[in-house]
Amino acid sequence: MSTDYINIFDTTLRDGEQAPGCGMTAEEKLRVAYQLEKLGVDIIEAGFPISSEEDFLSVKTIAEKIKNCQIAGLCRASQKDIDRGWEAVKHAERPRIHTFVATSDIHLKYKLKKSREEVLEMISGAVKHAKNYTDNVEFSCEDATRTDLEYLCKAVEIAVQAGATTINIPDTVGYTAPDEFGHIIRKLKKNVPGLEEIILSVHCHNDLGLAVANSLAAIKEGARQVECTINGLGERAGNASLEEIVMALKTRNDLLPFQTGINTENIYPTSRIVTQVTGVNVQPNKAIVGANAFAHEAGIHQDGVLKEKITYEIMDPESVGIPSNKIVLGKHSGRHAFKNRLEEYGYFLTDENIEIAFKKFKDLADKKKYVFDEDIEALINEEFLRSSDYYKLLTVNFAGGTGMSPNATIKLEIDGKEITDSESGGGPVDAIYKAIKKATGENPNLENYSVSSITGGTDAQGEVSVRVSENEIVSQGHGSDTDIVVASAKAFLNALNKLRWRREHPKVSNAKGI
Ligand code: KIV
Ligand code: ZN
């Protein structure tokens, strides 16, 4: 591999998933993993196997199915975590164990309650234990940027001596700035013997909005792996955004002469799939993948772009997979145009599924004049990307209006049986949710309910997201339909299906709160 090659380590399925409301089921994670493989990432961090049965299963399934990326599982620096992590990743063509421990005095004193010496022993023990399983071992010094620099050098040296093949320097709390981070990387490269033989990695959080700038500064100083997420998802303000790092390297290759293996025209489809799966929308002005990233509103800009794109466009929208010539589909569109549009967005369906999707598309086109790309994505998500359904929606009917008490009747298929129930409530959604609770016997707390319109116009599809919780278990559901009452029912059932799955597959431990 050439010395200017930057390994892209995607942690959307691990750090991204730790963000509130971004939890994904095993099926959803696999769907994203297939897309990340198409995107060309080098390493997929598929999860934190010891954190729950569900995460273990996700990592194991991804390791079995994805052939062209290394698959990493995160483990704390303990034998138990590493054993469990290995069980999950060992099926991969190229498995990686990623083990970590905090090195800052703040974390040592308040969280770990350990001395510096004890932590050095943990590092050596964990890396050596992982090496019994595989050669491909990554070690991370959590909170590295608030760690005493001499001690950080020592910790990294111990990990290198124990056999780590990648050393990761996380800015866990998004505290550093480009000059300072560049200095840390320079100092490590200069002071740690043997570091030149291994890959130095960085992992930046975005609390001060500097995650991408810090990652680029580290690359300039010799980091050859960056850890990042699609849409910049991640804990708190998120992680460094994959699309921004990759496009900065590509667009400013004169300043940053480095290469990646990313197929950039798959960036936008990947961003959309992650949005669909998590239900977390990208802010409109987000660089590269936001709805306005390539929209020119001001007359003077529009005039310039029409005369010559280069006046106001530094990147070609097509280079990140945003189709330039958006033909809006409608009820006269044929199967061929429909299939083409699906493929442009990364959905390669079997002939049988194309037929199912095409029929749904025609039904939608009867209700809506124009069917936009976002509608098609929602349709595919509804039909094919949902997790296993214990509770299936058959019909929902609602009566209400001025002077009437809203009443809803719901017919569900539950474990193979049809169940019908009715309830009244303060409003249509309230009535439906009560009827669903009665029919399913589920009674979680509804923590959040939000509705947005997928496209413009009164015939637009409504997209509903809900978050429910029961004891420690939290679950997020999404649903879309031209009728927001139906979308609300779908979203609630989606959340209940995930909740039930999680209840029936209890957590092994609660290690996620790192
Ligand atoms: O932010 C962080 O420090 C992490 C490590 C576990 C790599 O996510
Ligand atoms: Zn992180």
Image (spheres, rainbow, N blue to C red):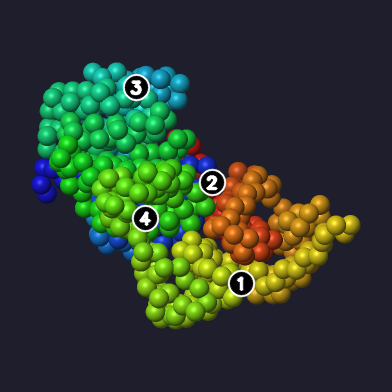
Q: Which residue is mark 4?
A: 268
Please report whichever mark, 1 or 3, sits nearer to the chain's N-terminal start.
3
- Screen quadrant of the C terminus: top left
> Residue at left 72%, top 68%?
396
Q: Secondary structure at mark 1?
A: helix
Q: Which residue is mark 2?
A: 21
Q: Outermost residue toward the right?
A: 403
Q: Which residue is mark 3?
A: 146
> Residue 10 in the image: x percent, y percent?
33, 48
Q: Which residue is mark 1?
A: 367
> Residue at left 29%, top 52%?
307
Please report whichever mark, 4 or 3, sits nearer to the chain's N-terminal start.
3
> Residue 58 in the image: x percent, y percent?
42, 56
From mark 4 to mark 1, how far is it between C-alphas? 28 Å
Q: Secondary structure at mark 3?
A: helix
Three-letter code, disc 1: Lys
Please report whichever mark, 3 or 2, sits nearer to the chain's N-terminal start.
2
Mark 1 surroundings: few (<14), some (14-19) or many (≥20) residues within 10 A: some
Please report whichever mark, 2 or 1, sits nearer to the chain's N-terminal start.
2
Residue depth check, mark 4 versus mark 1: number of the one nearer the observer: 1
From mark 4 to mark 3, how far is it between C-alphas? 35 Å
Three-letter code, disc 2: Gly
| Among the 4 quarters of the image, the one containing residue 484 | bottom right
Is residue 242 placed above or below 367 in the rendered structure? above
Q: Secondary structure at mark 4?
A: helix
> Residue 226 in the image: x percent, y percent?
27, 41
Location of ligand 1 given as a quarter of the image: top left
